[in-house]
Amino acid sequence: MSKHLIHIDSASDSSLQNQIRQQLVEGIVHGTFLPGTKMLSSRKLADQLGVSRNTVVLVYQALLDEGYLVSRQRSGIYVNELIAQGKVANRHLHTHKHQSQDNAHRFKGALQSTNETSSPLNWHSYPYPFLDGKFDASLYPVAQWRDANRKANAPKEIAQWSKLQGLEDDPMLLDEIRSKILPRRGIVADRDEILITVGSQQALHLITQLFVDDSVKVAVEEPGFPEIRDLLTRQGAQLVYQDVDSQGVVVSDALNDCDMLYTTPSHQTPTSVTMSMERRRELLNKAQEHDLLIIEDDFEFESNFLGQPHPALRSLDTQNRVLYVSCLSKVMASGVQIAFVVADSGVIHELKKLRKVTTRTPPLNNQRAVAHFLAMGYFDAYMMHLHKVFFERWLTLREALNIYLPNCINTGPIQGGTAYWVTGPKNLDGERLLKEAADIGILLEPVKRYYARSDYPENCFRMGVTSIANDRIRDGVSKLADLIHTLSDDEETLSNAKGQLLDDARLEQVLSGVRLECQMVYGVPCLIELWPDGTMRGSTGGLDKETDVGVWWIANGRYYRRWQLWGYGEEKSYYVVSDGQQIKWFDTNYAFVRYLNIVDYLS
């Protein structure tokens, strides 16, 4: 046996014992070590690999116990000849190859858009991945999840959950969801009103199977979640596209003839808008008046950063019209895949029957592990940590956009979530921006896939915070700003600006003792007071009202300012153009920065 057949990777997370075992098993299964081959002694193999003899002895003993190897008295250790029984000879594997066959004409259930991806597979190799739903692996609660799994797979626990049969979900998990998760959303439910699913997508699939056929008219948000459109179209539904505004999905007479509505009220997909309480009540009233069933997808209920989260539609519903779908945090979803539906017990019973003929009950060991994860308080601690991390990144991205792209973009007034819906300059070619941004290491999410209609805004894109470290955000936005300025060639510059460029004397005359107003990129007003003594005060509107102080001065034909907190506390200078009551700032590269309006003068 050549020493080159086994390679020890010193940088691998896998132990030496596991590496040796895995490579020996692969060699035996694939025929590198033929049946009946004598293996090196444990001492010789250990010497060749540079490991302790005890490591090799333990590997050999495990393979003997599992039947890969056999021991012959006073002869040595051999590859078990029984390994070859039942295997097709290797020579046959390469002599017969299936001819290529185009079966597309036979497809009866092909989908339109769910094969689209919003990022390259190697997204993690990009320095600035502003993507939503792609996660920093360091956020995963590895130790806590291992502990929960260990408890779930203890002999006593296995004896309990392995006895569950048929349609049953783990009662411990149902009770933990009832007591730990649903109360946060104002929802009260019994065990028979909860169904566990393999992720939110299975929950939506089961619901559409139960309630939708070609006689059913379903309203969906526009823009909205593309996969729900695919599920509904697959069932033959008649789709009605409902616009979204700053308060959530629009409630209009178009809903009067609909049978169902799918909505994402906590943080609308993809705009991140939170449905207002007024809109929630309006929607429930409409549902009562016109016998409307509502699917509430509450996948991101934990990430409200400004103010308290609104109660779920399900908690406000008194007529069992809302089917509530939610899941564990998205960071855990990719590995754990546990979600749930809350609905009337009769609906849950029918959904269980449908689930049984497809995937049956989600793995019970996984259900029990999640139950322990909740019961031991790991979920609460984990969500608090995520909330802190994502809030910090969310604010950092907002601040960077406001500093580097103040008048080029608008993110809209959102209260949380993990992504910003960004509207760029009117002439911005979004597809070109995304391509050229990727060329310099910046990944943005395109928005086309979220629209059912063809007239989507080409100057829009999304920026997420779940996949990028906080200390990378500012630099990424700075580079993005330079690119957007380059691509927006009709943008006003200092050389073509309408108005009068102010010199030192005029700057002092125009700015001293003035109150200015501008708009932040996230849709709230900001007032700036420039006092004659060189002090400066600022305040913003909105839910998270902010204040700051600083200093300002005039030199070399430019206005200088330095805030204590805002603008990273850094000194900045601008050329100023006065155009009536409007003030325009241009940076030292003569690029346009921001419009401000003179509101009044300080007394």
Image: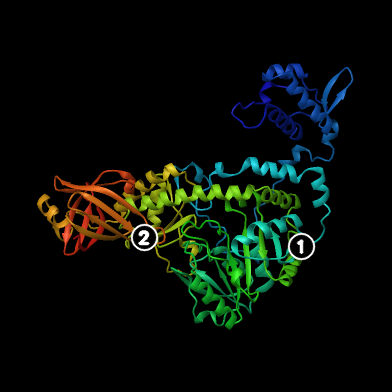
In this view, the residue farthest toward the front is 603
Q: Is residue 105 visible?
A: no
Q: Circle 2 — which element?
A: loop
User: Which quarter of the figure is the N terminus placed in?
Assistant: top right
Q: Position of residue 162 (x, y in %)?
A: 82, 51
Identify the image quadrant of residue 292: bottom right
Q: Which mark, by number, is residue 356?
A: 1
Callout 1 amino acid? Lys
Q: What's the residue type where badge 2 is placed?
A: Asn
Query: Horizontal placement of 596 versus 232: left or right?
Result: left
For residue 131, above or below residue 7: below
Query: In the rendering, at what x and y percent does residue 247 appear?
Result: 46, 69
Specify whether 238 is left or right of 502: right
Pair 1/2: label in front: 2
Q: Is residue 480 visible?
A: yes
For label 2, the residue is 410
Q: Residues within 10 Å of mark 2 (few under 14, many from 20)?
A: many
Badge 1: few (under 14), some or many (20 or more) residues near its Cα, within 10 Å?
some
The C terminus lies in quadrant: bottom left
The residues tagged by marks 1 and 2 sit, at their Cα atoms, a distance apart of 47 Å
